[in-house]
Amino acid sequence: MFDRFRKSKPGSSGLSPAQVKALQQLRLPGWSGSVPPGWVQIAGDQATLTVPFAAGDSILRPFREDTELGKLHWERRLNIAKLPNSQPELPLIYGNVIVVSSGKGGVGKSSVSVQLALALSGFGARVGILDADIYGPSLPTMLGGLDEKLEFNEQQKMIPHQRHGISVSSLGYLTEAKDAAIWRGPMASAALQQLFRDTKWPALDYLIVDLPPGTGDIQLTFAQKLPITGAVVVTTPQTVALADAEKGISMFRKVGVPITGLIENMSFYECGQCGHREAIFGTEGGARVAAAEQVPLLGQWPLASRLRAGLDDGQPLLVSNPADPLCEIMRDSATQLAMQLYQQAQNQV
């Protein structure tokens, strides 16, 4: 599957012996092994970390805190690699395609998809998001522009909306908000393929696909006929959600789609007045499933009213208040997602 992926050769880094030793000992959270020397370039007291995946400035924290490497002035650059997907015969024209799935509804899969897409875009990546939830498209509400319909070019390709710096395509931009999609499985699957292929996507580094919940026709069609680089499974800590998350992981593995990681949403509720935390849906359930299934735990996100309010208003928290502490949690998950996606492909060589 990953025969087209090749490891990049490290170039001249300008590292002194002491810096080489420090770099060999330094560890990035989530990264397996030492930092490749070819990622680091040093000129005088200026240092540049160039990574082949999307990441925020937080990735520089271990370098700045290191006794030896912290003497340098660090900056971050991205050189995002286009990774192979589950359909190697298809051209790599959509960027790295990441499907976000859940075994059941109501776990916040769409909100996770939106926040991941916005975080990746905030790092400087070119990001698109496809609303594949044919029966209940919610991205037009969460990202805004619900009343703005999709336009078509001369080749009858749909022009995606530009919302908060990302390209968005959704059936919700083609139909009235109150219309119901009364389609049988095959028709819904065909509509999804058309929405994917007939959208005139710009050049992308990542395409996030918000799948409908479950493991039915639409999920199988996407997994078997469309290119996927990796899958993210979203769950809450409660037992009923965890069982369905395990089914989702099993489905992707059966059709040969790599599981890039799991996000535990609604891990706890924190009172805005007193700061007390309440584990409404249980504790550490997602972490236990991730460990048992041997997939990375990309993050544990809280249940917070300001997250919900921003999405209801079409102004997600990462847009309306990027300095909010909750945004750092979501940005960390986005960094882990991109890092694990790259590392996953590298390990398949």
Image (spheres, rainbow, N blue to C red):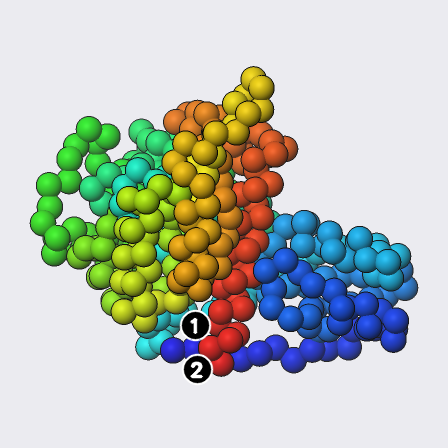
User: Label 2, on which residue?
Assistant: 3
Q: Earlier in the sequence, mark 1 or mark 2?
A: 2
Q: Name the side, left or right, on which 75 lies relative to 287.
A: right
Q: Secondary structure at mark 1?
A: loop
Q: Name the side, left or right, on which 77 lies relative to 12.
A: left
Q: Position of residue 209 (x, y in %)?
A: 36, 52
Viewport quadrant of the N terminus: bottom left
User: Residue, x 64% and y 63% (percent of image)?
Assistant: 51
2 or 293: nearer the eye? 293
User: Residue, x 49% and y 81% (percent of image)?
Assistant: 349
Label total for image: 2
269 or 2: nearer the eye? 269
Amino acid under disc 2: Asp
Q: Position of residue 240 (x, y in %)?
A: 28, 44
User: Residue, x 79% and y 53% (percent of image)?
Assistant: 64
How packed mark 2 is, by other alpha carbons closer than 10 Å (few <14, some 14-19, many 20 or more), is few
The circle on residue 348 is none
Q: Residue 135's image quarter?
A: top left
Amino acid under disc 1: Pro
